């Protein structure tokens, strides 16, 4: 085999192997962040408190669902972190098992279906909160929207009872949805242009039309909008009809209308004899 073919085949094989390595390195394994044991314990204790509140309200299916969720999370915490407060975890697990066993006997007709749907709500709510704190805002918003639908359906089963009992969970859910909506739509909110409202009256602009200009005829009518009357004209007007030309002082005597008046051009092309514009 010629030497150049050996070199070419070697280069092709090396390139293929290196490309395969590069492709394999471009897909890293997903990293799942597990909350600290202390954070998970607080979450467990939160559902225990919710269950105790619902027990006082005698909302058995909801209370049972809260205790079942707390027990499941506590068992997972014990498996993941066996060294975390073993005595306290064991005590709480025994207490939850006792409460769950006693509470099952309090369920009535239809309560099991409500409890199952409530557990679905808790799962969606917990998943949505986890996605929110992992900065997966779009996923969190969709998941919590599903949780809200489930909670609305649960409350619709017994509005008079469940609406008050689930008020705390409902408020927490709405707060999360409102916050996520503000994060997803902040660009649209901040891109709105500021509107300045100026109440200063700057007047109105009136364009002088051809009809407002003096006509090139013997009888000239001037619009009062273009040349408004002065205060003196308005004050003197009532007395003008009572005065005759003989009663006027010399400086206010009316000139003889028969005498020709001085003329002026309306434009550079106007004929002073009044026969129209010169060509």
Image: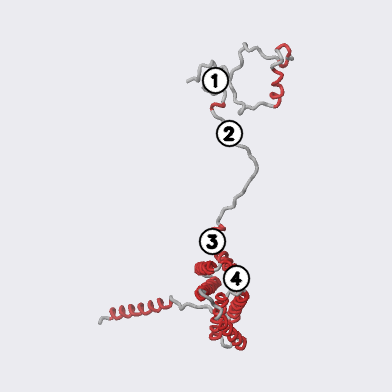
The mark that comes first in sequence, 1 or 2, is: 2
Residue at (46% x, 78% y) in the render: 29
Mark 3 and mark 2 residues within 8 Å of each other at the beta carbon: no
The residue identified by callout 1 is 216
CA gap, disc 4 and disc 1: 89 Å
Q: Which residue is mark 2?
A: 206
Q: Secondary structure at mark 2?
A: loop
Camera-nearest label, 3 or 2: 3
Question: Where residue 111 sits: x, y (%)?
Answer: 52, 75
Specify the quadrant of the image occupied by residue 244.
Answer: top right
Q: Earlier in the sequence, mark 3 or mark 2?
A: 3
Whole-angstrom CA distance, mark 3 to mark 4, is 32 Å
Q: CA distance from mark 4 to mark 2?
A: 68 Å
Q: Secondary structure at mark 4?
A: helix
The residue at which mark 3 appears reads as 185
Relative height, residue 205 to residue 166 (above, below): above
Q: Does the rendering let one see residue 140?
A: no
Circle 2: is it few (<14), some (14-19), or many (20+) Cα within 10 Å? Answer: few
**Residue 247 falls left or right of residue 140:** right
Circle 1/circle 3 CB separation < 8 Å? no
* In front: label 4 or label 1: 4
Q: Earlier in the sequence, mark 1 or mark 3?
A: 3
According to the picture, the residue beneath numbered tag 4 turns out to be 165
Work out whether residue 86 or residue 65 is closer to the camera in this orientation and state it.
65
| Residue at 54%, 60% in the rendered image | 187
Q: Nearer the viewer, residue 202 or 38?
A: 38
Query: Which one is closest to the eye, mark 3 or mark 4?
Result: 4
Viewer-side label of 1, 3 = 3
> Is there a contact, CB below 8 Å, between mark 1 and mark 2?
no
Q: Label 1, label 2: how many angstroms apart (C-alpha)?
A: 23 Å
């Amino acid at each position: 085999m010629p030497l150049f073919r050996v070199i070419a085949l070697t280069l092709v094989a090396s390139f293929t192997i290196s490309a395969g390595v590069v492709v394999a390195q471009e897909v890293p394994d997903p990293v799942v962040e597990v909350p600290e044991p202390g954070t998970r314990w607080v979450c467990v204790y939160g559902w225990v408190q919710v269950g105790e509140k619902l027990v006082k309200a005698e909302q058995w299916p909801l209370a049972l669902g809260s205790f079942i969720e707390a027990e499941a999370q506590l068992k997972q915490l014990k498996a993941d972190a066996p060294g975390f407060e073993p005595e306290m975890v064991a005590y709480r697990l025994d207490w939850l098992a006792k409460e769950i066993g006693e509470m099952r006997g309090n369920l009535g007709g239809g309560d099991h279906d409500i409890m199952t749907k409530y557990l679905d709500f808790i799962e969606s709510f917990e998943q949505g909160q986890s996605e929110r704190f992992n900065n997966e805002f779009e996923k969190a918003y969709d998941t919590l929207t599903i949780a809200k639908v489930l909670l609305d359906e649960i409350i619709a089963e017994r509005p008079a009872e469940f609406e008050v009992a689930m008020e705390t969970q409902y408020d927490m859910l709405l707060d999360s949805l409102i916050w996520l909506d503000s994060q997803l739509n902040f660009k649209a909110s901040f891109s709105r242009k500021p509107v300045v409202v100026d109440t200063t009256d700057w007047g109105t602009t009136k364009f002088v039309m051809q009809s407002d200009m003096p006509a090139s005829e013997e009888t000239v009518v001037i619009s009062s909008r273009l040349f408004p009357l002065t205060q003196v004209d308005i004050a003197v007007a009532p007395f003008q009809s009572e005065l005759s030309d003989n009663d006027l002082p010399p400086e206010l005597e009316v000139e003889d209308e028969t005498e020709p008046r001085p003329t002026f051009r309306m434009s550079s092309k106007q004929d002073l004899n009044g026969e129209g514009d010169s060509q």
